[in-house]
Image: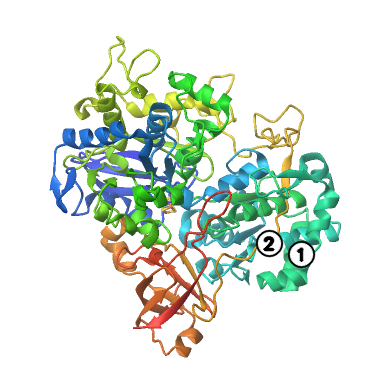
Amino acid sequence: PDGDGLSWNKAPCRFCGTGCHVQVGVEDGRVVAIAGDKAADVNKGLLCVKGYHVGGILYGKDRLTKPLLRKDGKLTEIEWDEAIEIVAKRIYDSPETFAIYGSGQWTIPEGYAAQKFMKGGLGNNHIDPNARLCMASAVTGFLGTYGVDEPAGCYDDLDECDVVITWGNNPAEMHPVLFSRVTDRRSRGENVRLIDIGTRRTRTTDAANVYLEMKPHGDVPIALGIMHLLIENGNYDRSFVEQHCNFRAHPESGKSLFGEAISEDEFRKRIAKYTPEHVEELSGISVDDLRMLADLFANPDIRITSLWCMGMNQHTMGTAVNTLVHGVHLLSGHFGKPGDAPTSLTGQPSACGTVREVGTLAHALPGGRIVAKPEHRKQSEEFWNVREGSVNAVPGYHTVKMFDQFTKPTSDGGDITTMFVQVTNPGQTLPNLNKLFNDKEPLDDKFLIVSEVYPTATTELADLILPAAMWVEKNGVYGNSERRTQQWFKMVDPPGEARDDTWMTIAIAHKLFEMGYEGMKDKDGEFIFAVKDDAGKEIPIWNFDNYYDTNVDKHLFEEYRQFTTMKHKNLAPYDEYVKARGLRWPVVEQEDGSWRETRFRFSGFDDPFVAEGEEFDFYHSSSKDGRAQIWFHEYEPPPEIPDDEYPMWLCTGRVLEHWHTGTMTRRLEPLNRAMPTGYVEMHMEDARAANIRQGEVVIVESRRGSCELPVWIDGRGRPPRGSIFVPFFDETKLINDVTLDEHCPISKQPDYKKCAARVVKK
Ligand code: SF4
């Protein structure tokens, strides 16, 4: 309870896509306590170890508090006015060679402001978020299947299902509070079977009834094999398929997001070769285990939830495997009833909210629109009140391409010269860092601007560093993995001169407006981010002293909300989110004036947009007939396979204690003590054969680079012989020097889960 100067307020946790709510205790202008929020449906008062320590992330000793400009190789403090002018001038001089690299940790207003600035203001689509590295394949997977992005189900499925299948996914560590729904039900005596399909044993395996170890890339043939058996045995859900599904494949001319229709007979013909024996060969899963999986899906009396995250998304067949797992659920009819759902999880707290819904990807516009469609551009221009033709029809560069263009000399066609990085750390997370990031160093004409809270691997190469406010130092809105939009208010002041990212975007935009840049004026000649008081007078929010005279977040959110109705991603007014612990979209107004959220999309019993009397309705179907698409994809081998020179599979990922690159969590002593260093997991037999001891520091190397790490044998994760695993949280051990930048041809998401490497004794 409040008292003695301590006040409590709600906020979503700053870390993972689960989206737990915390109660934040503030005293004397400082966050002093964190509690799980018992009123929140997502976590019902529970938090994981990161969540309990989230308040401490504000108080690391080395917070950035002043803008810093690199002069003669040295970082020098400058004033904000000068910093904003430097950025604005670079953009003014060459708007088309400017790029923004953002984040699934952007708040919705931050992402929306950056999006509007670039696409509506500069007519430049070179804006892409780090979520490209994280869930782009889930986006293209949902688009390919439903014609619209984001999962149909929600977390409630985990309360209702009989079986959970984790596809290359470790929710016990990555989404621990969500995973606890399953373990909690079991501890109450409920029978929930957990089948873990993975390439290494993890904490999720420890809780599983069955562990199926597949070869890297094995998920594709497993999904194909299940569908093959359902068809061969005649026990797929014929009625569901006949009423609600079509079959689809890529045309012969090449791969495309929506492909072309094929008949059911053609689908049967193509899938016929994925016999259990062939699938065993490709995936390593035995014939009996594949039959067990197919029999589960053939059983209409149980409810099955599939979960996946990076394992299926960071994959050169990422779009393919996403649509194939949807296909398994559709073909078997395990869809659309509570507990029956194919559900992708997101890593970041607002990968769904800010990246997918706001559309901060290089090809997208807010609310599920795309730059390539004239009617979508026109509608966006109308909402933004900017001149017709302001939005560029050509998609911008996706992340890998954007950094490739930035680190390539201008004389070689490297046409991105100024890059503004907000709320992310590409100097640690990009794949193949020596090519995509470190190569920038010798290039004088390239200029890197980084908005950050702490020094990072990215700020090391920055030309200009802008100190940022974080989490409850600013107002915010996030959107979690289950379509839940969550709002919070600023509770404490940021340190020194650290400022909101939204403010930075608006201040730069206003400087350009002052310089006469036409794109920063709307059709009436007014500033595109103008906010007015009740008397109609513009509030100078580009001066930080005035920024909080009005709730800019609310203003931007309400503007953005107009975009959300076309694809039935309807949001409620901002004030509804102030009252709630998040609401899952689509949210629609009821006759009594209240706002109702949606748990199960496309299902007639819950989704307000399903046509009257229909049990299911895929109302954004790419085939325009209300049906979902069941895809066929031919298996393709991984882009790099171990050989004599590099004989090990390398997989990378995360750990429970650290948030992504560890920038925040490594400054929290309890978490840092619990997991103090990066490491390489090795199988005992591989270590013995190479005469490597527990804890010994070895070199992990590939054709692209190397990294020194201590060995952990039989640790928390246990890879099989011939495989190693390295987490990426440790900035002193950059495993992304070793990974490769091959990516899914449709989603453009790189494959961090498999490349060829070797382990060498020092
Ligand atoms: Fe935060 Fe995720 Fe842990 Fe929940 S599960 S407390 S959102 S890190």
| Quarter of the image where one finds residue 109 | top left
Q: From where the camera sits, is residue 78 visible?
A: yes
Question: Residue 756: x percent and y percent?
Answer: 50, 72
The residue at which mark 2 appears reads as 635
| Residue 415 coordinates in the image, percent (x, y) | 38, 44
Q: Is residue 253 above or below residue 685?
A: above
Q: Secondary structure at mark 2?
A: loop
What's the residue type where badge 1 is placed?
Tyr
Between 4 and 595, the one lying in front of the other is 595
Residue occupied by mark 1: 274
Total number of numbered discs in the rendering: 2
Compared across the picture, whether 535 is left or right of 748 comes to left
Give neighbour class at mark 2: few <14, some 14-19, many 20+ (Cα, 10 Å).
Answer: some
Q: Marks 1 and 2: CB-CB under 8 Å?
A: yes
Quadrant into which the N terminus falls: top left
Q: Residues within 10 Å of mark 1 (few under 14, many from 20)?
A: many
Q: CA distance from mark 1 to mark 2?
A: 9 Å
- Residue 548 showing in the rendered view: no
Question: Left or right: 480 with respect to 472?
Answer: right
In the image, 490: left or right of 712?
A: left
The label nearer to you, 1 versus 2, is 2
| Observer-nearest of 95 and 15 | 95
Mark 2 residue type: Tyr
Image position, residue 57 (x, y; %): 28, 51
| Residue displayed at 51% across by 29% down | 571
Q: Is mark 2 within 8 Å of ligand 1?
A: no
Q: Secondary structure at mark 1?
A: loop
Query: Foreground residue, 413 or 18?
Result: 413
Q: Which image quadrant is residue 552 in?
A: top left
